[in-house]
Image (cartoon, rainbow, N blue to C red):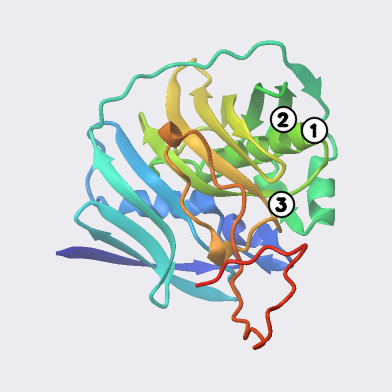
Amino acid sequence: MSDNLTFTLSSDEPLVGEHIVNASPTVPGALLIELALTARGEPWSGPVALRDVRFSEPIAVSGQTSLDVTLTRGHVSVGRAHRSSFEARIESHPLVTQRSLEVQGVRSLSVEKIYDRWAELGIEYGPTFQTVAALACSEECASGRITAVSAGRTWVTNPLAVDAVFQILGLLASEIQREFAAHVPVAIECLTIHRPFGQLTAAAVEVSVTSASGRSIEADVVLIDAAGGVVASFEGTRMVRLGAVKPDSIQPVLPRHTGGVPLSSLAWSEVTLPRARPDLRGQTWALI
């Protein structure tokens, strides 16, 4: 049995129109998370977890677009025209531990012109999304401060605060990779909402890096309200450098106990070998 909801989004809405990727208003991944949580259709009664979160392809919006949210036996997907852009498993009342992360040895970074620099790379954040107020980091951790407009008391999350988490992770990835670049979220092992934070307007973000490479970063994150309470925790959040992987070729992250993530992928092409024995020196072939 499935539960289905349909939402209509407009490029005139700030949550879409001020989030521009390559000149097109694009639905933020943070908003897809909020839409997925609405699939529960229940009043808040305790923590909720989204496990095995996958962002598979962006959703560009021209004028208006309808998104379908489908919940089937605990599996939630969000997309349009029978193509899913977001998938996760939803779990009510998970066993959770609210904890802060140890952030030490960080140095302050200037965030004064980060939105201008992202715009040069094709990621344009309007004023509503310019939420990162301060950031300090090392190659292992980071702490940041964000300010955001309230989404409203009926929202489970504030997508602006969640997007700010992704922005901070992208800045940390650029710092580790020694080159300013745009990064996008592709997976979260477990996102736990400890309590609703739709009205959150100021928060601290703490980050602990679990792995990093030249094209991606994986980290744990906690979002902390002004009273010092953890409102959301992100375990195994993976950001990939834009252009390093095509959205429709994103593969799931390997579980942590395997010791890592894929380093490369194969592009197959069919080749007809000549009758004479070919000279394959200096080449690597896989024959099937």
Q: Secondary structure at mark 3?
A: strand
Residue at the far front in the pictured view: 276
Identified by mark 1, the residue type is Val
- The image quadrant of residue 231 is top left
Q: Which residue is mark 3?
A: 125
Q: Which residue is mark 2?
A: 133
Secondary structure at badge 2 equals strand
What type is the residue that disc 2 sits on? Ala
Residue 111 image label: 1
Quadrant the N terminus occupies: bottom left
Q: Earlier in the sequence, mark 3 or mark 2?
A: 3
Disc 1 from disc 2: Cα separation = 7 Å
Q: Position of residue 263 (x, y in %)?
A: 61, 47
Q: What residue do we see at 49% from left, 67% from top? A: 9
State whether residue 13 is above or below residue 211. below
- View extreme (bottom): residue: 275
At label 3, which amino acid type do we have?
Answer: Tyr
Q: Which residue is depicted at the point 38% across and 19% down?
A: 98
Task: Tell me where residue 267 appears, x and y as whole percent.
Answer: 61, 68
Disc sitting over residue 243 in the figure: none
Residue drawn 53% across the image and 20% down it: 226
The image shows residue 84 at horizontal and vertical percentages of 42, 66
Residue 214 position by quadrant: top right
Secondary structure, mark 1, is loop
